[in-house]
Amino acid sequence: MADRITPKLTFVLAQPDRKMFDAAMGAVPDGKSAALLSENKACDFKLRPIDAVNALAEMQETRAQFQEAINGLGVKADFCVQNAATARKSLLICDMDSTLIGQECIDELADFAGVKDRVSAITERAMRGEIGFEGALEERVGLLKGLDLSILQRCFEDRITLNPGAKILCQTMKHGGAKTAIVSGGFTFFTQRVAALCGFESHQANSLIEKDGQLTGEVGYPILGREAKYDALMSHSGQAPLDAVAIGDGANDLAMIEASGLGIAYYAKPAVAEAAHCAINHTDLTSALYFQGYKDADFKTG
């Protein structure tokens, strides 16, 4: 007899609402037991056991069925279907730009340099996977040549904001014993500060080269891109990527998202959302906690 697993479906509503919550509960296929995670907002459902051999296909079918059902009911929710036994992860590894923060730092720096339209267009194409990340980064950084270093701190203070739930996500998983890491295709000047704000234990990113108080228009090598993010996942997880939750939004996040045990696309480009295990499109980063079975009472802010 084949090994069997018990999948679970977790849904999180965009807004707490009793009527919509009941509707979503009724749409869960073959739900055997439920655990309330957040009043009128988030719930965990244990589903019927399935053969491990066919688990991926059956869970994909469950996802499709639930998505169709809640669409028909007009329910805005994010959800995840996964193996209940391995839902709680021991590593959180996150992209930064447009994931932990609401901005693309290079686009904001470009605004100070008067070239935001040009840089933003390149950023968009790179995040969609239409052009290579490394070449796109070199081209964009080249347009920042001559920018005064003081602008970096001004940009951080005036423009950069944490996305909702970023600090709670990091602090709660740390309290639960997980390692936490930022792995970004952006810049260490910003990852250092965002890591400190949220409480991440480590951060990796690219370095901007400066001379005489100005940016030279060059980036340090090697450039941290798609494969480097995958390598970071493997390193931080001790070659056990299935124990990790990886969150990102762009094409350079794909390798770590696909290899992790729980890869989450956060308001992501279509190709990323399609490849991820689940997506956050309506809610905030705390949904990554609900997907692992954390309850509101478990949330930490410091």
Image (cartoon, rainbow, N blue to C red):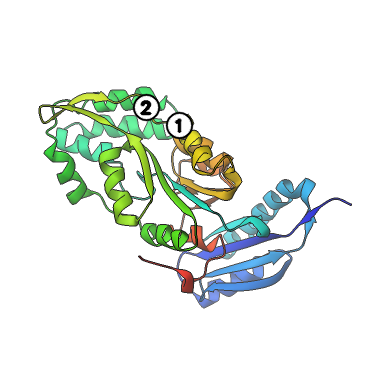
Q: Which mark is residue 211?
A: none
Image location (x, y in percent) of residue 223? 37, 27
Locate residue 51, reporting x and y percent. 80, 52
Task: Report the number of discs.
Answer: 2
Q: Position of residue 203 (x, y in %)?
A: 36, 43
Res. 220 image quadrant: top left
Where is residue 167 drawn, in percent x and y?
36, 59
Instruction: Name the image quarter holding the C terminus.
Output: bottom left
Which residue is more in the foreground, 228 or 163? 228
Of the residues shown, which amino acid type is indicated by label 1? Ala
Element assignment for label 1: helix
| Pointer 1 or 2: first along the chain | 2
Disc 1 + disc 2, Cβ < 8 Å? yes
Q: Secondary structure at mark 2?
A: loop
Residue 75, visible in the rendered structure: no
Residue count near mark 2 (Cα–Cα under 10 Å), binned few <14, some 14–19, many ≥20: some
Q: Residue at x 45, y 44 (%)?
A: 248
The residue that label 1 is drawn on is: 228
State the residue in front, 170 or 47.
Answer: 170
Can residue 66 be seen here? The reply is yes
Residue for point 65% across, 52% down: 64
